[in-house]
Image (tube, rainbow, N blue to C red):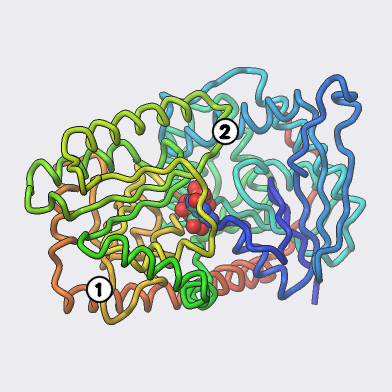
């Protein structure tokens, strides 16, 4: 068995329960296969501590069967690579938010510098038969930088966020460089068929790649294969959490506390892609249009802190606080607070109980690669009395979860109607929808995701590799 080397911006100890998302998925998989997990240590070296000179310090730790190897970043590299290019350019543009992008010309050099440094640090650690799996938008050029150092390994890439249509992508200065870099991989995975379609139309129209059929394209002297591999959750693990003492305790406390109410729940990182203000406005519209929900419908919105050094995130924080405050002020009663908004991270073990106690989940991003909260909510439900998922049609998950109530989150009135429908839905219909959604999330779970990606990577044709053709 070849060894698996996973590379992602952040690395987590796979023996500990992480906050969720990517870290949980990868930790779970690496725990079973063993291997190496390489990424940034999370540590930033300030100029006073040696700045650039102090960067690249390697830390190695054995965590069960997994070797964790991390590197430090200098303040300058962190600001241009992480805050600047990754989260100030790629994150907003890939989520179709050109208005929020900060195209500072200096960022791309830092982005490339860090990818080069990652490649330099990783390459000496590789064994000849390793398989390398690179994750997400921070590390798009990593394979090209590894190839430039003579690395001939099988390398796959998975993009966790959406890939926008060509004309949006083309707004990024250096977009051609970025997509060319994807051709250094043997396999490029996307969350949805829509993303794959955007990739194919970009490479054919902008990069004049030759379509070889079977999702393979040839350009820049390389052939790349691409595919849609919708990420899933570990359904059994999540259901186990729901049935564990802490999960049950949370469920019972929520049921007691809200016994006379119908709970609605939203759990998101506080991010402008998640459509939080639009969601709160749709809830306000629900109260306005359907007064029968007064004193009953109660929305718990958890917005876990995220990237607080980026100004777009502080703007949204203030907007949310003011929206929730005005709803509670205008509609609340002495014994009923319509919205409970928490800008805090809730322990993972408590989430399943919260989901299970809720009649409706509001998962209404304006754009989302997949959205794992939608799948976690379904997994946590009691099949005999399940809650209803209200899901944005712009989440990658909507391609799979057709039996959710799909909404356009920009359309506040229709979203409010869908929420009302969800609150009124008879148990028979809730059961039927839930059963059909569960069969999808069970079939396409996180194990399917890892296995199908790695199998396809192992089968991808071995390629000639070569010269440092990646010039900025
Ligand atoms: C990216 C893509 C894609 C959230 N708040 C708390 C908490 N969470 C956990 C959830 C879930 C995870 O974080 C969030 O995953 P999502 O998929 O919803 O979203 P992103 O963080 O934006 O993830 C996304 C994903 O990568 C995987 O490919 O689906 O589209 O944007 O697991 O439960 N966990 C805890 N407390 C919280 O307050 N413990």
The extreme bottom residue here reads 384
- Circle count: 2
Residue 403 visible from this viewpoint: yes
Q: Nearer the viewer, residue 349 or 440?
A: 349
Rendering coords of residue 139 (x, y %): 67, 43
Pinpoint residue 311: horizontal percent, then vertical percent. Answer: 50, 23
Spot the residue most to the front.
334
What mark, if any, has residue 129 been given in the picture? Answer: none
Residue 211 in view: no
Label 1 close to label 2 by CB (< 8 Å): no
User: On the picture, is 262 further left or further right than 29?
Assistant: left
Q: What's the residue at 86%, 37% (across, down)?
A: 56
Label 2, residues with CA under 10 Å away: few <14, some 14-19, many ≥20: many
Residue at (60, 51) in percent of width and height: 218
Image quarter of residue 388 = bottom left
Residue at horizontal 90 percent and vertical 55 percent from the top: 125
The residue tagged with tag 2: helix, strand or loop?
helix
- Left or right, 431 with respect to 118, comes to left
Query: Circle 2 sits on which residue?
Result: 87
Residue that appears at 82% across and 43% down: 71
Classify the position of the C terminus by image quarter.
Answer: top right
Chain-order first, disc 1 or disc 2: 2
Direction from residue 79 to residue 212 in the image, left or right? left
Percent of width and height locating residue 308: 55, 31
* Residue 118, percent from left and from top: 80, 42
Above or below residue 42? Residue 400 is: below
Q: Name the residue under label 1.
A: 433
Q: Mark 1 and mark 2: span between their CA atoms?
A: 36 Å
Tag 1: Cα neighbours inside 10 Å, few (<14), some, or many (≥20)?
many
Q: In this view, does 199 lie above or below 420?
A: above
């Amino acid at each position: 068995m070849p060894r698996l080397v996973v590379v992602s911006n952040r690395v987590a100890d796979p023996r500990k329960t992480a906050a969720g998302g990517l870290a949980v998925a990868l930790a779970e998989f690496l725990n079973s296969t063993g291997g190496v997990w390489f990424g940034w240590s999370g540590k930033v070296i300030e100029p006073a501590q040696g700045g650039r000179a102090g960067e690249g310090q390697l830390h190695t730790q054995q965590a069960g069967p997994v070797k964790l190897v991390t590197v430090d970043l200098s303040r300058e590299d962190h600001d241009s690579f992480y805050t600047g290019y990754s989260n100030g350019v790629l994150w907003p543009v890939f989520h179709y938010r050109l208005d929020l992008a900060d195209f500072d010309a200096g960022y791309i050099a830092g982005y490339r510098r860090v990818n080069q440094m990652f490649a330099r640090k990783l390459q000496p650690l590789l064994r000849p038969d390793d398989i390398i799996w690179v994750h997400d938008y921070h590390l798009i050029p990593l394979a090209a930088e590894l190839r430039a150092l003579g690395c001939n390994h099988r390398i796959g890439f998975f993009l966790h966020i959406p890939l926008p249509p060509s004309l949006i992508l083309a707004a990024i200065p250096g977009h051609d460089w970025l997509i060319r870099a994807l051709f250094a991989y043997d396999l490029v995975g996307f969350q949805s068929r829509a993303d794959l379609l955007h990739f194919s139309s970009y490479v054919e129209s902008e990069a004049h790649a030759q379509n070889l059929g079977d999702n393979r394209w040839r350009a820049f002297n390389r052939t790349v294969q691409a595919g849609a591999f919708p990420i899933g959750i570990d359904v059994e693990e999540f259901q186990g959490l729901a049935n564990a003492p802490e999960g049950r305790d949370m469920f019972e406390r929520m049921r007691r506390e809200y016994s006379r109410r119908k709970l609605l729940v939203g759990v998101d990182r506080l991010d402008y892609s998640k459509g939080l203000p639009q969601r709160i406005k749709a809830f306000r519209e629900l109260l306005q249009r359907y007064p029968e929900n007064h004193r009953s419908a109660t929305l718990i919105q958890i917005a876990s802190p995220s990237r607080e050094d980026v100004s777009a995130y502080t703007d949204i924080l203030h907007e949310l606080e003011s929206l929730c405050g005005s709803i509670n002020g205008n509609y609340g009663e002495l014994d009923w607070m319509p919205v409970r908004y928490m800008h805090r991270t809730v322990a993972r073990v408590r989430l399943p109980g919260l989901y299970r106690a809720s009649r409706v989940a509001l998962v209404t991003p304006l754009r989302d690669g997949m959205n794992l909260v939608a799948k976690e909510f379904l997994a946590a439900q009691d099949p005999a009395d399940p809650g209803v998922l209200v899901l944005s049609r712009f989440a990658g998950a909507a391609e799979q979860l057709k039996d959710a109530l799909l909404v356009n989150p920009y359309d506040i009135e229709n979203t409010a109607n869908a929420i009302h429908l969800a609150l009124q839905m008879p148990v028979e219909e809730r059961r039927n929808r839930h059963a059909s959604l569960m069969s999808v999330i069970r079939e396409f779970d996180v194990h399917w995701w890892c296995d199908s990606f790695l199998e396809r990577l192992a089968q991808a044709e071995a390629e000639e590799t070569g010269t440092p053709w990646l010039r900025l």
